[in-house]
Image (cartoon, rainbow, N blue to C red):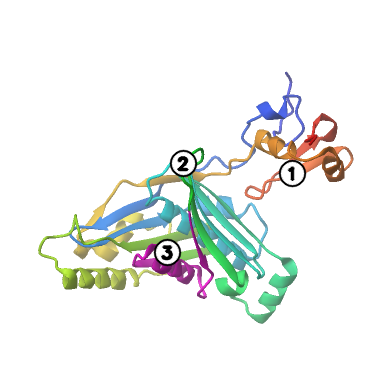
């Protein structure tokens, strides 16, 4: 059967069979996440550097730089947390609040496919920006909750941790989650900014691991405490500029920080542009609406559904759609 050139336009191929990838970047960062640990010390971590992937993801939406930076931090954080888990499916961060950015979402699959967006309320955002040029994450999100979800689909258990939004920064909010829900000591450094090369985002995440197994036999509790404090103090010397510098390899950056602390690099993980929308998925959503609802959505005989992640509009002929008859 013949087809039009763009998978976002109506096609003569039945929509439920049309799985073509929309016209979005086919981009992979081979060493997007670099896991590491400190030998004989209760410390493990991940260095996340999205490189050009940050620009590809963040420029899909025309948002205020303050909102874009928050979305970039969420993407880097989600990639780093997902890399620490053994799962099949997707791991997501979701913040819902009553502020200028009522929705913040980032999602990473077990294969490293990354996507996300921040939805802003124009009038509320204007009010926030009138008060300050550099609003905090708390000022943008307002009051609400932060959720971390591991969804493995099918019959597998769906794990979710939810905490109230507390703290001025996304870093502080994440710390609240780990202290209250996971009871794990962490150090998180997030950065996102527009550079000469475009938007860049990164994260450094340290976690304190249990003292049993993998820790030097001579290291008692006091020594473990001191090793953790030393690692955090060294991590705190990292600057945003270093974290976002494409010219500074991740391995070299980690050696700058931890070379004297038994740094051991683990297998790096690739990250990729991960929007998973398709005509088939959106057609399935439309099939759940009734005929009257579909009529209401149609304009000049066409229904347009826009993917919130890649910001592409998929157009469907109303005459070809059959809604839910229930």
The residue range painted magenta reads 160-188
Q: Earlier in the sequence, mark 3 or mark 2?
A: 2
Q: Secondary structure at mark 3?
A: helix
Direction from residue 38 to residue 286 in the image, left or right: right
Q: Earlier in the sequence, mark 1 or mark 3?
A: 3
The residue identified by callout 1 is 305
- In the image, 213 versus 4, the foreground residue is 213
Identify the mark at residue 156; answer none if there is no mark. 2
Direction from residue 323 to residue 258 in the image, left or right: left
Q: Quadrant of residue 280?
A: top right
Judge whether 194 appears above or below 9 on screen.
below
Judge whether 75 appears above or below 221 on screen.
above
Residue at the extreme left of the image, as rendered: 218
Residue 17 is situated, as x and y percent measured from the top left of the image, at 66, 26
Give the crowd class for mark 2: few <14, some 14-19, many >=20 residues within 10 Å: few
- Measure how far apart labels 1 and 3 are at the Cα level: 37 Å
Give the crowd class for mark 1: few <14, some 14-19, many >=20 residues within 10 Å: some
The residue identified by callout 3 is 181
Q: Secondary structure at mark 1?
A: strand
Identify the mark at residue 19; answer none if there is no mark. none
Residue 16 is situated, as x and y percent measured from the top left of the image, at 68, 29
Q: Residue at left 73%, top 39%? A: 288
Q: Quadrant of residue 88?
A: top left
Q: Is residue 310 visible?
A: yes
Q: Residue at left 75%, top 70%? A: 123
Q: Is residue 240 visible?
A: no
Judge whether 283 appears above or below 81 on screen.
above
Q: Residue at left 66%, top 55%? A: 61
């Amino acid at each position: 059967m013949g087809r039009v050139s763009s998978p976002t336009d109506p096609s003569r191929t039945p929509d439920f069979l049309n799985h073509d990838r929309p016209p979005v970047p086919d981009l992979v960062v081979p060493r997007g996440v670099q896991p590491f640990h400190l030998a004989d010390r209760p410390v493990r971590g991940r260095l996340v550097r999205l490189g050009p992937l940050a620009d590809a993801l963040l420029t899909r939406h025309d948002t205020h730089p303050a909102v874009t930076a928050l979305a970039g931090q969420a993407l880097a954080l989600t990639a780093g947390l997902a890399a620490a888990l053994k799962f099949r499916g997707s791991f997501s961060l979701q913040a819902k609040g009553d502020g200028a950015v009522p929705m913040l979402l980032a999602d990473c699959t077990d294969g490293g496919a990354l996507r996300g967006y921040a939805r802003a309320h124009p009038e509320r955002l204007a009010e926030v920006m009138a008060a300050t040029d550099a609003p905090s994450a708390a000022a943008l999100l307002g009051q609400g909750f932060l959720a971390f979800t591991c969804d493995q689909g099918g019959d597998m258990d769906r794990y979710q941790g939810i905490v109230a939004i507390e703290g001025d920064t996304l870093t502080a909010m994440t710390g609240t989650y780990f202290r209250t829900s996971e009871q794990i000591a962490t150090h998180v450094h997030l950065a996102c900014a527009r550079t000469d090369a475009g938007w860049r985002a990164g994260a450094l995440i340290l976690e304190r691991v249990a003292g049993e197994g993998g820790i030097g036999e001579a290291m008692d509790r006091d020594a473990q405490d001191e090793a953790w404090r030393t690692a955090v103090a060294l991590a705190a010397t990292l600057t945003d500029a270093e974290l976002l510098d494409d010219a500074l390899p991740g391995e070299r950056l980690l050696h700058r920080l931890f070379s004297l602390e038994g740094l051991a690099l683990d297998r790096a993980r690739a990250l990729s542009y991960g929007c998973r929308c398709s005509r088939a998925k959106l057609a399935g959503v439309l099939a759940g609406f009734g005929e009257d609802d579909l009529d209401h959505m149609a304009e000049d005989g066409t229904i347009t559904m826009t993917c919130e992640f890649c910001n592409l509009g998929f157009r469907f002929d109303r005459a070809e759609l059959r809604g839910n008859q229930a």
